[in-house]
Amino acid sequence: MGFIAGAVSVLIFHQFGFWIANELGLLKVQLYSVRPLPPWGVPAILSSAFWGGLWGIVGAYVVPRVPPSVDGPWGWMLFAGVFVTLVNWFVVLPMKGAPIGGGFRMPGVMIVPLVYAFWGFGMWVVAGLTRRALRWR
């Protein structure tokens, strides 16, 4: 359920969030990019959906264990908007040779966590729909 929620949410909510940022002139992000990524030449959007799915698994484990005050959509949004953003900034980007936090340039430093939070909201929506469709509790 977590993998499905994370991957589908990347394809819908994550990309829609970046589309909004593009339309508002805040960022310039190529949506649904099929640019091959090294080392295996996987299209960027499929790579993003795969990693979103893995983060969905982590979220499906972590979010139900947060205090009840941040349960539901807030828990998913905080997980994605804070935790996933920080891991991206301080682990993933340096591993790719990019500066920490992408150099903390504006407006990306403000927009990316919001888009990730929107992706987290999408994970909550898709996880709920998946649970109901498969009759999981």
Image (cartoon, rainbow, N blue to C red):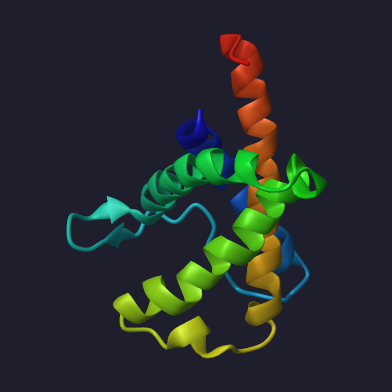
Which residue is farthest left? Answer: 39
Residue 133 vertical placement versus 109 (above, below): above
- Front residue (pair 120, 45): 120
Q: Residue at x 54, y 62 (%)?
A: 84
Left or right, 127 with respect to 121, comes to left
Whether 125 is drawn above or below 121: the answer is above
Tell me, yes or no, if residue 82 can be seen here.
yes
Looking at the image, is 127 positioned above or below residue 38? above
Taking 25 as reference, is 123 left or right?
A: left
Tell me residue 87's x, y (percent): 47, 69
Residue 91 coordinates in the image, percent (x, y): 39, 74
Left or right for 70, reference 113:
right
The C terminus, quarter of image: top right
- Outermost residue on the right side: it is 69
The x and y percentages for residue 55 are 47, 49
Taking the spot 36% from the left edge, 51% from the top edge, the residue there is 47
Where residue 123 appears, as percent x and y from the top left, is 62, 40
Q: Residue furthest top?
A: 135
Q: Quadrant of residue 92?
A: bottom left
Q: Which one is nearer the viewer's eye here, 6 or 11? A: 6
**In the figure, 85 relative to 78: above or below?**
below
The residue at 47%/69% (across/down) is: 88
Q: Nearer the viewer, residue 43 or 85?
A: 85
Is residue 6 visible to the viewer in this orientation of the structure?
no
What is the count of numbered marks? Answer: 0
Identity of the residue drawn at 55% across and 46% down: 62
